[in-house]
Image (cartoon, helix red, strand yellow):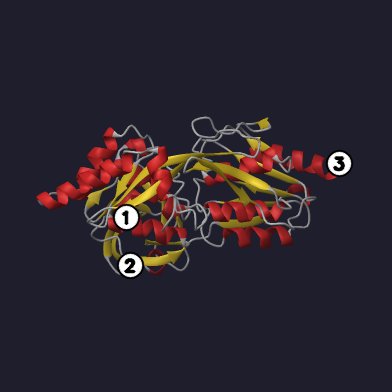
Amino acid sequence: MSGPDLFSQPRRLGRGAALTLVFASVLVAGAATGSLPQGDEGTGAARSVVPDGRRQVAQAAAEAMAQGTSPLEAAERAVSRSGDRWAAVYSEGEYEEFAQALDGEYTGVGLWARRESDGRIAVSKVRGDSPAAAAGIRAGDRLRSVDGRAVDGLPVTDVLSLLRGDATDARAGTAVRVGLERGTRAWAETLRRATLSTQPVTAEKIRGGGTLVRVAAFTKGVGEAVRAAAREASGGVVLDLRGNSGGLVTEAVAVASVFLDGGLVATYDMDGAQRALHADAGGDTTRPLVVLVDGGTMSAAELLTGALQDRGRAVVVGTRTFGKGSVQMPTRLPDGSVAELTVGHYRTPSGHAVDGVGIVPDLEVADGVLGRAERVLSGLGRMP
């Protein structure tokens, strides 16, 4: 990926924890990063906004390479000293997986997991065309171990990370052995990881004749998928962005274009100047629209929410969003790893800064959110 990126996950958790969160999101939702439109390469921005950060990280990596030590570890140390709360360093393989995820694919075995009240890990869902389904694994089965490691009591994100594999084996065709239990039966299966496509957009009818369109992440093709869902909707639309940790900004702008007739979506500062993102002309500006958000609504999802709210196109319902509105630039290091440092921030059409603040809904609701959204949508449908 070239150009600046809008990364969605909080990076100051430490590299391992952040990656676990990111790849757990990839496994379930399909993406966790986002990119600005191609052509905004922003190399000048890296010099003007953070004049020393990228240079220092690159220099530390080059010196480590010359001394025969790890450029990645040297870059991590430099990033930790930078004071950049969103900065991170990734191995070459990890960054390639981000690119794959943004294309709407991930490598895995096709099962989801949940942690039960007793600390046990259960299979919550199995993808139909996956290695897990082919092995006969079902929702409700207990997951006892992954590659010989007991998983009882582990956080679900750690379990998903084990299933995904690490930098040495997180590839299609590699094997992972899982221990399972169903009733009194205990057995083990060896699964081969596969490249699976994500399903980031789903649509279903709701009360009152409206359509609920859920967008889990902004991967490639999401804009067109939302357009198709809106085209099939007979009434108003509830656009559910809860838990959406971001994605390709170009796809978020494409979704904005479904509901706006051109105009400003967001501005962002790079290279000492303001730049703008605009919706395409011709969107549906009359269909009633409600947007659902929560504390897991991040980055590109916040950019879209802010545009629809500021432009008066949608009623936003839920709780305050996460507050991730910074722009990161990828720098390739000598060993192929990638460092990310912040080079700017974006704002909503009215000039609202999102980073560290988030977006406050028009109607703050913590419980029964969908029911409230249905009532709001019905009211919008009766307005002249």
Q: Please tell me which of labels 1 and 3 falls first in the chain.
A: 1
The Cα atoms of the two marked residues, 3 and 2, are separated by 52 Å
- Say which element carries label 3: loop
Q: Nearest the camera: 255 or 381?
A: 255
Q: Please tell me which of labels 2 and 1 falls first in the chain.
A: 1
Q: Position of residue 303 (x, y in %)?
A: 58, 43
Q: Nearest the camera: 241 or 6?
A: 6
- Say which element carries label 2: loop
Question: In the rendered image, is residue 338 in sight?
Answer: yes
Q: Position of residue 132 (x, y in %)?
A: 38, 64
Q: Nearest the camera: 256 or 97?
A: 256
Q: Nearest the camera: 338 or 192?
A: 338
Q: Residue at x 24, y 44 (%)?
A: 75
Residue 333 appears left or right of 210? left
Q: Which amino acid, by three-letter code, is at mark 3?
A: Met
The Cα atoms of the two marked residues, 2 and 1, are separated by 14 Å
Q: Which residue is mark 3?
A: 383
Q: Which amino acid, by three-letter code, is at mark 2?
A: Ala
Circle number at residue 42: none
Packing grade of label 3 (10 A; few <14, some 14-19, many >=20) is few
Quadrant hosting residue 328: top left
Q: Which residue is mark 1?
A: 94
Task: Give the answer, above or below, for where 251 lies relative to 377.
Answer: below
Q: Which residue is mark 2?
A: 172
Residue 252 appears left or right of 5? right
